[in-house]
Image (tube, rainbow, N blue to C red):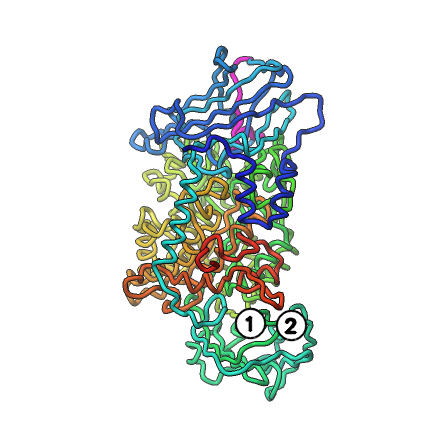
């Protein structure tokens, strides 16, 4: 039976499963705090129903429709109606007839009708500014609609907005449904309030829950716990040999840093011992000690595979000895020991631990463009990533929706948005529809002045903070697509008056590409564009080029990322882009080939830079390399975002051509994707549903990819990365929900050896899920009041609420907690 309404009760029940019960209940009791009607004389209409899916109006069941019902509380003559939804209702016809698969909403119709009999209707128009230099109306996932002729909303009358036969991806959860609805009356924004109970997604939630339970059970059944007797450590070490007896950290302890005069890691030991156990710790540089904690140079580095991030820990009855090659190994030894001493109030089993990472690159991408995260929040994420033994922050700092660092733009259009500004409000999720909003925060609406920028001193503080924790930062300013915020800020340099090409991006933009055909020429804006573009990345490099992570081998000098992804196929379409016709080098090239040549020219003008980007910045098709691309020896990293089925061939081609490759397979480690198909789970689902199990699956997919590469080039697969794209990540609490416990699956896949992460024999294609699930724990409290498991540890140390808090991994592996 299809669920006809999403009741407040059902949403409450879901929140009870994923959030602390008291917080979930209090959230619902004040769930509308995120959308407040302005204090004015006009009362907005009341939204009464939102119905979406393949409805009766759809002649093709692959299309979907949306009906929005409302009642006017007073007569309104001059109005527009808008909302956020993670798709666009813009109609686009590809100028190249053979590319009709790019068409958007060409069969769609939109109208408003007076109800109940649809006796009076008018066609609705998608309202869009005529130029990117004007203040936005509709833009991206912000849809603003209006009528061509006057259509007054009469007091007491009911109306229905009908959007029929859209070909954008279907709405499968509340997170992607129309929300934060608003009216604009005589230029004034009136935000409305909607309850979850008015939504009908025409989806069988009971069937969803059955499928989720089956998925969890199947994941559990296909493997056994390969290292059931191993330690509780996440990620699992290479070897853990349990001894006899225990060692108890005394109330006063000495940390003997015989390894280095640099006491960075020793200082962390001192801080954490005091914070966790109230222990008084002193630091010296003695190389002889019969008690306390001794950090020293390892005598035989082959024990840890000669890996600078590896370590050996020997826990005896009277001391802890840490043998390392450099401070990075000592820092990761500290992360392991900290987990252990928190299990039983400072008493640790005697053991010998040998450990080193599988991959040199273990990364997390943070998108601060779509939603801004404070200095403290970025530092907190770095702490959590370092605890997982991740060592790279791929920092996405500029996209269509905002540029978050000072690139000498001197224009707030680069980072400020809201209705009435150059950039309208974007990606304004509705507070009471977000199950991660347990703090009952007020969220931005379309007319909120939303901004955020990191000062140069902020950046230096974050760099230092990251490097001290062996995290290298790779900064990313996305271009030549995804550049709308830059264009808003610098229109004179970044808009080519000769470019009349008509394109449509996957995010619904028609005006977010830079004028690549003018780069290095005198054509129109060529001189200005060339100077500004070069300066942007020179400034970016200057801000990040002097990093000193604990393991210096992690840092590639002068590495910046240009992004280079998702340029629409008709961007710079030659018949419409006169500059591309005039520049004969570009005239006959496709959009992607134009981008490749542009980056090649940029790299030639900036030979000091190591240019990194997503696979499209050097690949022309699903796997083939472009004809004119940045050479491998000038590339820092190439990230693969495609799903593993297609991404594998891309990775193989790149690796065998000498490019350093990082796997961000979207079906494995795109953390912004929803955990499950439940209508209540937040997140996108275009590449499937991602959870801790799929993140661990990246270990299997990495093995498959490496085995497909010629042996002499297998070392070019550098590692794995999880992504936190922030279209839906409104708050840090939401980010943490999407990141944890998924990050533990990524950490296990990127650090732990294949013998631990991968199944064997008939289960070789499945990850060793049972082992990780048991170590993540179920949040059970012991008689001494200690929570057990890695997730409980994260919560204790960092005060976070992972998904499923406080019950550990129970939502994903109830079998581990039964």
Total numbered badges shown on the rendered structure: 2
Judged from the image, the secondary structure of the residue bearing numbered disc 1 is: helix
Q: Nearer the viewer, residue 747 or 792?
A: 792
Residue furthest to the top in view is 119
Q: Which residue is mark 2?
A: 273
Residue drawn at x 35%, y 42% as measured from the top left: 585
Label placed on residue 340: 1
The stretch in magenta equals 134-150
Q: Quadrant of residue 182?
A: top right
Q: Quadrant of residue 26?
A: top right
Mark 2 crowd level (few <14, some 14–19, many ≥20, 10 Å Cα)? many
Residue drawn at x 50%, y 61% as measured from the top left: 392
Percent position of residue 705, x then y: 32, 59
Q: Is 816 inside the magenta-drawn segment? A: no
Percent position of residue 351, x then y: 50, 79
Q: Nearer the viewer, residue 673 or 514?
A: 673
Percent position of residue 368, x then y: 56, 48
Viewport quadrant of the N terminus: top left
């Amino acid at each position: 039976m299809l669920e006809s309404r999403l009741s407040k009760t059902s949403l409450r029940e879901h929140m009870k499963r994923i959030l602390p019960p008291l917080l979930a209940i209090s959230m619902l009791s004040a769930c509308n705090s995120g959308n407040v009607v302005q204090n004015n004389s006009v009362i907005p209409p009341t939204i009464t129903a939102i119905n979406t899916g393949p409805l009766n109006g759809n002649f093709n069941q692959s299309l979907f429709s949306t009906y929005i019902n409302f009642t006017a509380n007073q007569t309104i003559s001059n109005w527009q109606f808008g909302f956020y939804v993670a798709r666009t209702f813009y109609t686009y016809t590809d100028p190249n007839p053979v590319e009709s698969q790019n068409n958007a909403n060409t069969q769609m119709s939109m109208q408003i009708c007076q109800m109940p009999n649809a006796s009076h209707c008018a066609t609705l128009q998608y309202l869009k500014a005529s130029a990117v230099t004007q203040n936005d109306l509709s833009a991206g996932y912000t849809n603003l609609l209006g009528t061509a002729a006057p259509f007054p909303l009469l007091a007491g009358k009911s109306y229905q907005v009908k959007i029929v036969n859209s070909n954008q991806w279907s709405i499968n959860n509340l997170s992607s449904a129309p929300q934060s609805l608003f009216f604009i009356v005589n230029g004034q924004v009136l935000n409305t309030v909607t309850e979850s109970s008015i939504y009908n997604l025409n989806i069988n939630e009971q069937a969803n829950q059955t499928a989720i339970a089956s998925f969890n059970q199947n994941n559990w059944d296909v493997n056994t716990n390969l290292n059931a007797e191993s330690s509780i450590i996440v990620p699992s070490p290479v070897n853990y040999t349990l001894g006899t007896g225990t060692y108890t950290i005394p109330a006063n302890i000495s940390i003997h840093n015989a390894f280095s005069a640099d006491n960075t890691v020793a200082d962390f030991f001192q801080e954490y011992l005091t914070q966790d156990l109230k222990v008084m710790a002193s630091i010296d540089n003695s190389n002889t000690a019969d008690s306390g904690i001794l950090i020293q140079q390892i005598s035989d580095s082959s024990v840890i595979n000669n890996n600078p991030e590896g370590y050996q820990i020997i826990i005896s009855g009277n001391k802890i000895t840490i043998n390392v090659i450099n401070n990075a190994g000592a820092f990761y030894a500290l992360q392991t020991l900290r987990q252990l001493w928190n299990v039983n109030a400072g008493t640790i089993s005697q053991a010998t631990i040998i450990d080193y990472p599988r991959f040199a690159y273990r990364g997390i991408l943070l998108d601060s463009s779509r939603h801004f995260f404070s200095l403290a929040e970025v530092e907190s994420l770095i702490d959590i990533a370092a605890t997982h033994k991740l060592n790279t922050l791929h920092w996405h700092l500029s996209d269509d929706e905002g540029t978050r660092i000072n690139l000498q733009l001197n224009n707030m259009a680069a980072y400020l948005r809201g209705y009435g500004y150059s950039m309208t409000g974007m990606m304004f999720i509705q507070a009471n529809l977000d199950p991660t909003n347990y703090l009952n925060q007020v969220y931005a609406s379309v007319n909120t002045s939303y901004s955020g920028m990191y000062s140069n001193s902020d950046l230096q503080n974050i760099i230092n903070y990251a490097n001290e924790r062996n995290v290298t930062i790779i900064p990313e300013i996305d271009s030549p697509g995804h550049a709308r915020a830059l264009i808003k800020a610098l229109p004179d340099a970044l808009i080519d008056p000769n470019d009349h090409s008509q394109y449509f991006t996957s995010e619904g933009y028609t005006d977010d590409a830079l004028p690549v055909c003018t780069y290095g020429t005198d054509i129109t804006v060529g001189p200005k564009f060339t100077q500004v573009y070069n300066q942007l990345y020179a400034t970016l490099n200057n801000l990040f080029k002097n990093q000193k992570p604990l393991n210096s081998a992690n840092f590639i000098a002068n590495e910046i990322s240009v992004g280079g992804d998702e340029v629409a196929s008709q961007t710079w379409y030659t018949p419409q882009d006169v500059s591309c016709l005039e520049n004969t080098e570009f005239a006959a090239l496709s959009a992607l080939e134009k981008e490749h040549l542009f980056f090649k020219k940029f790299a030639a003008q900036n030979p000091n830079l190591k240019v990194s980007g997503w696979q499209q910045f050097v690949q022309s098709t699903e796997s083939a390399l472009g004809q004119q691309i940045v050479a491998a020896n000038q590339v820092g990293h190439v990230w693969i975002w495609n799903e593993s089925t297609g991404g594998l061939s891309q990775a193989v081609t790149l690796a065998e051509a000498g490019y350093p490759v990082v796997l961000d397979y979207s079906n494995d480690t795109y953390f912004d994707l929803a955990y499950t198909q439940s209508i209540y789970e937040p997140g996108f689902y275009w590449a499937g549903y991602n959870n801790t199990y799929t993140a661990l699956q990246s270990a299997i997919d990495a093995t498959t990819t490496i085995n497909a590469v010629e042996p002499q080039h297998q070392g070019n697969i550098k590692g794995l990365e999880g992504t936190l794209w922030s279209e839906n990540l409104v708050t840090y609490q939401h980010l943490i929900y999407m990141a944890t416990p998924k990050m533990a699956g990524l950490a296990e896949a990127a650090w732990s050896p294949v013998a631990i992460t991968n199944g064997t024999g008939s289960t070789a294609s499945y990850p060793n899920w049972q082992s990780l699930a048991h170590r993540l724990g179920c949040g059970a409290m012991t008689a001494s009041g200690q929570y057990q498991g890695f997730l409980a540890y994260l919560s204790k140390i960092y005060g976070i609420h992972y998904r499923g808090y406080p019950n550990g991994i129970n939502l994903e592996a109830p079998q581990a907690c039964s």
